[in-house]
Structure formats: structure tokens, C-alpha cells
Amino acid sequence: MEREVNNMWKEVLKNIEIRLNNQRTFDLWIKPVKLLDINEHIVKIEIPNSTFEKSFLPFIGILKEEFYKVFGFIPEFEIVYPSDFSEYRREDALFEISLNPEYTFENFVVGPCNQLAHAAALSVAQSPGVAYNPLFIYGGVGLGKTHLMQAIGHYVKEKSKAKISYIPAEYFVNEFITSIKNKTTHIFRNKFRYLDYLLIDDIHFIGGKEGTQEEFFHTFNFLYNNRKQIVLSSDKPPKDIKFLEERLVSRFEWGLIVDLQIPDFETRVAIVKKKAELRNLSLSDDLVFYIAEKVKDNIRLIEGILNSIVAHLKLLNRPIEKFLIDEIIETLYNLKRDEKKFVNLKKIIEVVCEYFGLTPEEIKSEKRIRNIILPRQIGMYLGREMTNSSLTSIALEFGVKDHTTVLHACRKIKQLVEKDRNLKDLIEVLKEKLNEQ
């Protein structure tokens, strides 16, 4: 069988050679192509490298036509390079971020606030790339976006051998930056373009990152055109994501957009009961209703409360009373509030560098090029706005000469913010990210 396929492939190449009637063109751009695998209508071919690919792509149409004449079906080509064919096939690399075993469809409590989102997520898990592609889920913190995304992952992993990757958008950004630095963008592309499912959490994180958006645009097109399922989540709908290119907004709206709303009291009661059951925690209806009444806008907080109750019960042998629940809730809310307040200069440098694709060493260097000067000045401005640090302390942290440089930067950014709406929005995005840390 293998020999027969190889002979048929040779016939395809021979037909193309005759059709081109140009030996040099054939030897350069067709002869090096190798047939690796045929799986239904997906044909895997190997080419030398990414440089070769740019000149090879115009011949794809001819290759499809001649392939059809010999094999009898129109192929969908998957292109790989010699160095990374085995890498992207590795099963242990498909899930970049581990899945929470609790986040399954069976453990997701369905109510009026999330019924459509749940049904859509289950549908794409069962029938990828058919009706809802992409599926875009949005909603506030702790309302179930990550649970649904990972539920899809669990379902697909259990029911099929499909290649799937679930990652936060930040991971995609960092991987892309690393691939540029290491000159391995071809490996990066194959890693994400030859999947059956690509699930990305917090896609709003790519807003304003032009290079990443360009790369994701092509990855999206490749997967979509090959009918592979794309699932995205965000804290807001596509059109409201700041600094997201219009062409991406348009593509995100091609499929189905569903939102997750704050659950009503009855749904919250069901959620508390389900999550308590998963922890083998027995709660009276009175206590269940009490927790559901106290926590209205963040389901993730319910998990924290129940985990704390279990800890107090097992480690301290404390009885479960409303007083204990109040104590736990107050502690969790205070921690959440204190975390938002704690912003220091190191954190500002970290967030600014991450956003602009720089290293702390670069932003603290003496380089006077625009792509470093502006982020440095923004960082110093945020340091002045969001911390109690003195001008001298900011100067030392950012590696500038003295406090007058910091003062100049703060004045300049303040003036620009008043005139430039985009820069104002950018500052707000960075402030939000710092408050979320």
C-alpha cells in the first residue's frame, strides 16, 4: 500500500514537471517537497524551511489539481519542516496548560445566566468547526469562562484523539516573542496551526500588540480555512477590546458570541451545592443559602470559601457556622482588595516590559531609541501616579540620571495623554493590568 502511494506521488510530481515545462523551477520549488502522510483528505507534506515556503505557496493550486487527477480527491495540505515534524506531533505537548479536573461539563451548573454559553460550548466539543467557529465567550471575572473552555478540553481529550491546545493569551504572546528572539517562528507556527482545537483564554491580552495580532490573524485564518475549531474568551465582546485590529474584531464575530451573566440566587445555590459535593463537604441548606446570598458576582470566590471551610474543619476542627463563613469571606475580600493596592516600581517595570516586548535590562539601559524611550517614560509616569515612591527612587529604579529626568517624563506623558486618546487608553490598560496583579 505504501509503495502504491509513493508511486502515485511520483506520478503527481512528474505531471507537474511536464506542466511547468521549466526544469529549473521544478527542481527548485517542487522536487524538494516530500509526502509524509495521508489521513482522509488531510495530506501532510514536508518542505525544507520557512524561506522555501514563501516561494512554494504559489504552486499549491497546481499541486492540488494534479493530486486530484491521480488520487481522486482534493487534498488539504498540512505543511511541516524537517526539524519540527516530530515536535508538533508530540501528544504531551498538546495541552500547554494543565486542565483543572473539576472543570468539566458534568460539574458546570447550568442556569438562565449561562444556558446558551454552555450549549454552544458542548456543541463545538461534539462537532468542531461546523456551526460556531469561532466560539467567543465573554463575561466578568469568575463567571465560568475558564470552566467552559477547559470543559471542552476535557470532553475532546476523552472522546477523541484530536490535537488540542488550551492556553491563556499571555502564553501565546510570550511564545511568539521567544520564537522571534530564537529565530524559530516556523516551529511556533506549526505548533499552533496544526491543531484540531485552539482554545485561548483572555484573548483581550493581545490588544495593542501589533506583531502578535499579525501572527494570530494568520493562525486564525489557517485554522478557520481548514475547519478547525477556535474557541476564545474575554472579559468583554470583540468590539470593546481596546487596541484590537478591526480585521480581528471582524473574524471574532464570524461565529457565535455568547456572554456569561451574573447568576441568579437559585443558580448560585445550585453552584454552592455542586462545589460542596465535589469536596465531600456537607452543608445545611441554611448555610448554602447564606453563602449564595453573600457571594453574588464571582463564582470563583465560592470555591475559595469552600476550600477555606474544608481547611478549618479538617485542620482546626472548627464547626461550620455563619460566623466562620463571615470571617472567611471578609478575609478573602480583604486579600483581593489588598492585592489590587499593592503596586511597586518592580511590578510596573515588569508589566510595561511585558506589554511592549522589552526586557527590564533594555528599559533601564541608556539607549535613546523611540521603542524604548516611550515605554520608559510611561513606566516612570505610572510609578509617580500609582506608588508613593519619590522622584529619586523612581530614577534609581529606572536607571536614569536623576529626578529631573523623571519629572520631565511625567510632564511629557501627562501632556500627551491629554492630546492622544490612544495613549490615554493604553495608560488605562496598563493600570488595569497592574491592579489585577
Image (cartoon, rainbow, N blue to C red):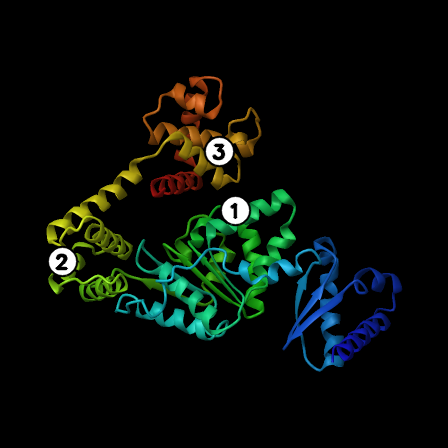
Looking at the rendered image, the disc whose residue lies closer to the viewer, 3 or 1, is: 1
Image check: 372 left or right of 295? right
Q: Left or right of 431: which side holds 74?
A: right
**Which element type, helix, strand or loop, lies under badge 2?**
helix
The residue wearing badge 1 is: 174
Q: Which residue is mark 3?
A: 375
Residue on which disc 2 sits: 290
Q: CA distance from mark 3 to mark 1?
A: 18 Å
Residue 193: give x, y in percent of width and height.
Answer: 58, 61
Within 10 Å of disc 1 (Cα), the crowding (few <14, some 14-19, many 20+) is: some
| Residue closer to the observer: 285 or 411 | 285
Viewer-nearest of labels 1 and 2? 2
Q: Is residue 86 above or below residue 125?
A: above
Say if 137 sits above or below 8 in the image. Answer: above
Image quadrant where residue 59 sits? bottom right
Which x, y percent locates residue 254? 47, 66
Whether residue 132 appears in this view of the structure is no
Q: Residues within 10 Å of mark 2 (few under 14, many from 20)?
A: some
